[in-house]
Amino acid sequence: MNTLLERVQAVLSTTPERWQRLVSTLPNDLLTRQPAAGEWSALNCLQHLLDAERLVFPVRIHAFLAGQDFEDFDPNQQHAGPDSQTPEQLAAAFASDRQESLALLKQVKDEDLARTAQHPQFGTVTLAEMLHTWAAHDLMHTVQAERALMQPFMLGCGPWRSFFRDHEIGVPKE
């Protein structure tokens, strides 16, 4: 696995299974628990990944391949889908949409990676940069969700809590 396309495909293919495992195993109150005021719960992270799967990354691949520019995405203002879905339904929708995205990604060739588009905030960007961003975005929000899930457990660690200081949310660092 040496090419960017293979690496991105590998990262993106693991995310749905991780989420399906989390939502099928963990209780809803843990999934929806905000780690601190104004911070996203694990479920908020999954909803955001679903939004990005529907409104951002595949849309941008199509734009790059068509030689078109694209709009900015504001995660606080754009949302794709009903809020009434269960965690399992969200994970299933994400898995389904991700399969479509992976099929689209297989159409991208190494020679396409240098294609450019105009981003409203960042100016000229390449398809390769966007693919790096997609993989990092998946991993970042999965880690963010896992950090949110860690919070109540860390609080109960007693003397071992100091091992987790770097992962505490909403606690000032010493």
Image (tube, rainbow, N blue to C red):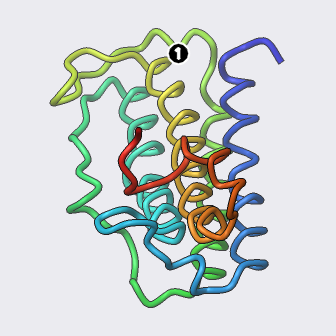
Residue at position x 70%, y 37% in the image: 11
Q: Is residue 13 left or right of residue 115?
A: right
Of all residues, the one furthest to the right in this rendering is 1
60 over 148 or under it: above or below? above
Percent of width and height locating residue 139: 60, 41
Name the image quarter holding residue 75: bottom left
At 72% across and 25% down in the image, what residue appears?
7
- The residue that mark 1 highlights is 112
Query: Which residue sits at x=63%, y=54%?
Result: 98
Return the residue nearer the eye: 125 or 87.
Answer: 87
Residue that extends furthest to the bottom in the rendered view of this protein: 84
State the image coordinates of residue 85 (x, y, percent, origin top left).
51, 86
From the viewer's perspective, tell me whether residue 14 is left or right of residue 4.
Answer: right
Q: Is residue 96 above or below residue 15?
A: below
Front residue of this view, candidates 20 and 119: 20
Residue type beneath disc 1: Asp
The x and y percentages for residue 122 are: 22, 22
Q: Quadrant of the C terminus?
A: top left
Quadrant where the N terminus sits is top right
